Image: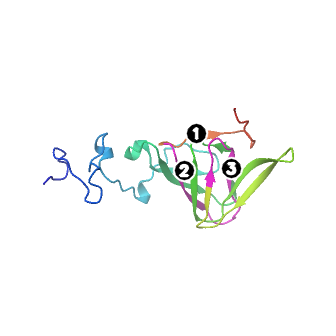
């Protein structure tokens, strides 16, 4: 029998005997991590008009392919235009009715498209798609949980909302 911290003997999960109980990569990769609400980190990439807080990242827990945190948008506020580079981004609306705005070409014209949300809704943002978040509510902050397919938050702030040319 092994004790916590003793990695000399190989442990196995009864449901998955082929998997090792400890992962390669050291102490950040061989245990579960609990990040409390008060411990999320504001020291992450930011965009004017919103506040991002990192919870799960390469720096905080040693994640290799995932970043997760939350974003707060103040009442009656719009973020700056931005994209998230190579990251796929999944968004879950926790509080408020944030709106997600992006540009789309229709009939040879570029138009803004506005996705109006409510708590419980999800949004998917593909890599490199410029967008912004808005909170039209004059009184209450909007809060969303964000998961990204990279270990750190990639944020590229843009001067305007536009459709990027796709490389062939």
Q: Position of residue 129 (x, y in %)?
A: 67, 44
Locate the C terminus by quadrant.
Answer: top right
Dot 2 crowding, Cα within 10 Å, few <14, some 14–19, many 20+ = many
In the picture, the disc for residue 52 is: 2
Q: Secondary structure at mark 3?
A: strand
Disc 1, disc 2: CB below 8 Å?
Answer: no
Among numbered discs 3 and 2, the one appearing first in the sequence: 2
Residue drawn at (27%, 48%) of the image: 20
When the figure is inspected, residue 109 is found, relative to residue 139, above or below; the finding is above
Is disc 2 placed on a helix, strand or loop? strand
Write the residue at 60% across / 42% down: 84
**Above-or-below relation of 167 to 150:** above
Label 1 sits on a secondary structure element that is: loop
| Residue drawn at point x = 15 percent, y = 53 percent | 3
- In front of the other: label 3 or label 1? 1
Q: What is the x, y in percent for residue 118? A: 64, 67
Position of residue 95 measured from the top left corner of the image (x, y, whole percent): 58, 65
Residue range highlighted in magenta? 124-150
Left or right? Give the position of 83 relative to 107: left
Quarter of the image with the N terminus in it: bottom left
**Residue of label 1:** 86
Who comes first in sequence, dot 1 or dot 2? Answer: 2
* Residue linked to disc 3: 132
Task: Residue at the far top: name it.
Answer: 168
């Amino acid at each position: 029998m092994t004790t916590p911290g003793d990695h000399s003997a190989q442990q196995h999960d009864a449901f998955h005997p082929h998997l090792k109980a400890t992962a390669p990569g050291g102490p950040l990769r061989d245990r579960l991590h609990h990040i409390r609400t008060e411990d999320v980190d504001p020291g992450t990439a930011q965009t004017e008009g919103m506040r991002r807080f990192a919870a799960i990242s390469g720096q905080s827990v040693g994640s290799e392919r995932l970043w997760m945190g939350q974003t707060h948008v103040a009442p009656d506020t719009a973020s700056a235009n931005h994209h998230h580079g190579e990251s796929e981004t999944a968004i879950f609306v926790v509080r408020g009715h944030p709106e997600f705005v992006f540009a789309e070409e229709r009939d040879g014209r570029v138009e803004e498209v506005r996705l109006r949300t409510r708590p419980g809704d999800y949004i998917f943002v593909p890599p490199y798609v410029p967008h912004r978040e808005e909170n039209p509510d004059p009184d209450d902050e909007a809060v969303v949980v964000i998961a990204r397919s990279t270990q750190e938050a990639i944020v590229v702030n843009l001067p305007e909302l536009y459709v990027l040319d796709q490389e062939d």
